[in-house]
Image: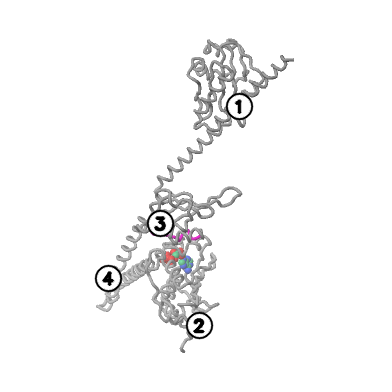
């Protein structure tokens, strides 16, 4: 009876010891500062608990080759046999080796060892290394030792896996931080509630703030730059937004959303591209072009005058007359180009400085003048030039000079690009509270693809029929910008093989009306 009691007490003591051991190991796993420290301590505890003479924990994966063993001779020998032990596991060898000499590869290195236990560290079906325990004399594992080792191996494997995942995350975070820190463009990351999550050093400098002080604050409370805040609320404005900071640097912001699967938008990344250099270069270039064009204007005017006077200065031979006409034509072409370069520069929405010079404009008179100017060139090409001008056209408050140039460009083009024998129709009417000017031709038409870019600066459609037609690609850019400056628009409707109609629309409202009145001024007939 007392013997049974003794056995029971011994079993109980053993169970308490095992639990205490597991508790110790779990504690170490949870509280160790580093993976190295944890593995060394656990190896030591296990070795002592199982009365092993040597112990080693070997890791695979990213930390392949890392060994954790106490400095005693048997553990050191186990470390030397790590590769052989790994091969033993790879070949599906037993976890418990009662006689090491039976496996020559191990017996050679582990001369003083009698028996061995080798357990793989497996988590989520991946092997992260192994634990090996060595015994100088024969050692048969008890059932509870088996269970204890299996539990510890499982826990250590999970801890190794976690540590490795953490390490790789920290590594990528460090990499990202290094990339952001060395990025010359300011980068600002905000969460879905518009609180600042991250600012790189370039952003701190551009916004004159310190990341540590503004992190977590709402961007609206930190940044007073209106264009940036507007962009955050309406990402579609990205192409047109520019922002200049107090130091005079100009930035073009780009906004991209951070999306995370089904959770939708997690935040946004605002990248500010420093375009100061580009702006300065562009401004210099614009100024240069504008100065040169301006200075060319007056010599061209008197060249035009003198060249036109040549026939009056004396009788010219037919050859001389022809040469004089060519000179006059060439000067007119140069004057047109210089005028267009000047207009395009002034009207450019990005760099232009042009303010509309509004005055009472008689659209009927203006349209008729343009038609008169084009009568001769149209006749030369055997083109029919038709006018459909609404005779009751109101007097409007427009920049007459600019609008005239815009309509002139359209009629010029229609005459230039319509083959001989065709028809050009110039119309002006009031439609749905808009002044609509249009120029229709029976030319070759323009493909859908080319129509989309036609109003961009320097855009010319290359086709063999127009090879001899001279142009700058600035005319339609000017047309569009004149219309837009008046709050309107310009566009083309065209069909290949049929012809094109170009439109200018100016709304009859606000400043476009005389005195900004609600109703257009009636004509005084
Ligand atoms: P350009 O000085 O080259 O005429 P524009 O800006 O006025 O410059 O016109 C741009 C291009 O649009 C032209 O080069 C031409 O290819 C095309 N285009 C303009 N008007 C017409 C038209 N009425 N018919 C066909 N193509 C035209």
Give the image location of residue 109, x and y in percent. Answer: 52, 13
Mark 2, other Cα within 10 Å: few <14 / some 14–19 / many ≥20: some
Query: Residue pushed farthest left?
Result: 313
Q: Which residue was labeled with disc 3? A: 251
Mark 3 CB near ligand 1 (8 Å cut): no
| Whole-number angstrom distance, CA of label 2 to CA of label 4 | 45 Å
Q: Which residue was labeled with disc 2? A: 519
Q: Is residue 104 visible?
A: no
Give the quarter of the image for residue 46.
Answer: top right
| Whole-number angstrom distance, CA of label 1 to CA of label 2 | 92 Å
Q: Secondary structure at mark 4?
A: helix
| Whole-number angstrom distance, CA of label 4 to CA of label 1 | 99 Å
Between 289 and 106, the residue placed more toward the observer is: 106
Q: Secondary structure at mark 2?
A: loop
* Mark whose residue sits in front, 4 or 1: 1
Give the image location of residue 226, x and y in percent. Answer: 44, 62
Q: Which residue was labeled with disc 1? A: 22
Q: Which residue was labeled with disc 4? A: 299
493 is higher (above) or lower (below) than 198: below
């Amino acid at each position: 009876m007392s013997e049974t009691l003794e056995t029971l007490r011994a079993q109980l003591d053993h169970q308490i010891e095992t639990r205490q051991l597991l508790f110790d190991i779990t504690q170490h796993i949870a509280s160790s500062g580093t993976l190295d420290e944890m593995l060394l301590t656990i190896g030591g505890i296990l070795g002592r608990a199982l009365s092993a003479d040597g112990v080693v924990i070997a890791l695979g994966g990213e930390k392949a080759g890392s060994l954790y063993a106490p400095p005693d001779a048997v553990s050191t020998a186990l470390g030397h046999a790590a590769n052989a032990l790994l091969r033993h596991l790879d070949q599906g060898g037993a976890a418990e080796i009662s006689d090491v000499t039976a496996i020559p590869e191990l017996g050679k290195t582990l001369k003083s060892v009698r028996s061995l236990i080798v357990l793989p560290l497996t988590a989520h079906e991946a092997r992260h290394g192994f634990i090996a325990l060595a015994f100088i004399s024969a050692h048969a594992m008890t059932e509870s030792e088996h269970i204890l080792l299996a539990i510890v191996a499982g826990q250590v494997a999970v801890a190794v896996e976690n540590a490795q995942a953490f390490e790789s995350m920290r590594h990528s975070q460090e990499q990202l931080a290094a990339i952001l820190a060395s990025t010359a463009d300011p980068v600002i990351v905000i969460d879905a509630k518009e609180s600042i999550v991250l600012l790189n050093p370039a952003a701190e400098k551009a916004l004159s703030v310190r990341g540590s002080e503004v992190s977590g604050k709402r961007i609206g409370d930190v940044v007073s730059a209106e264009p940036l805040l507007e962009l955050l609320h309406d990402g579609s404005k990205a192409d047109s937004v520019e922002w200049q900071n107090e130091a005079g640097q100009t930035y073009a912001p780009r906004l991209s959303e951070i999306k995370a699967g089904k959770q939708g938008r997690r935040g946004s990344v605002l990248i500010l591209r420093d375009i100061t250099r580009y702006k300065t270069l562009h401004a210099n270039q614009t100024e240069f072009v504008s100065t040169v064009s301006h200075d060319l204007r007056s010599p061209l005017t008197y060249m035009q005058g003198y060249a036109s006077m040549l026939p009056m200065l004396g009788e010219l031979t037919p050859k001389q007359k022809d040469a004089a006409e060519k000179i006059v034509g060439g000067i007119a072409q140069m004057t047109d180009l210089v005028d267009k370069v000047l207009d395009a520069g002034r009207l450019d929405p990005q760099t232009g400085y042009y303010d509309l010079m509004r005055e009472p404009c008689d659209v009927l008179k203006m349209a008729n003048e343009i038609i008169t100017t084009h009568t001769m060139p149209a006749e030369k090409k055997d083109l029919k030039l038709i006018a459909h001008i609404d005779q009751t056209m109101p007097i409007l408050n427009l920049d007459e000079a600019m609008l005239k140039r815009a309509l002139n460009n359209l009629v010029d083009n229609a005459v230039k690009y319509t083959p001989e024998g065709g028809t050009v129709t110039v119309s002006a009417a009031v439609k749905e509270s808009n002044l609509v000017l249009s120029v229709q031709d029976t030319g070759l038409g323009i493909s859908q693809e080319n129509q989309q870019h036609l109003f961009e600066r320097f855009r010319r459609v290359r086709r063999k029929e127009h090879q001899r037609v001279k142009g700058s690609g600035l005319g339609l850019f000017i047309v569009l910008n004149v219309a837009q400056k008046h709050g309107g628009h310009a566009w083309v409707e065209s069909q290949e093989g049929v012809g094109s109609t170009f439109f200018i629309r100016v709304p009859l409202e606000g400043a476009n009306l005389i005195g900004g009145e609600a109703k257009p001024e009636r004509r005084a007939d």
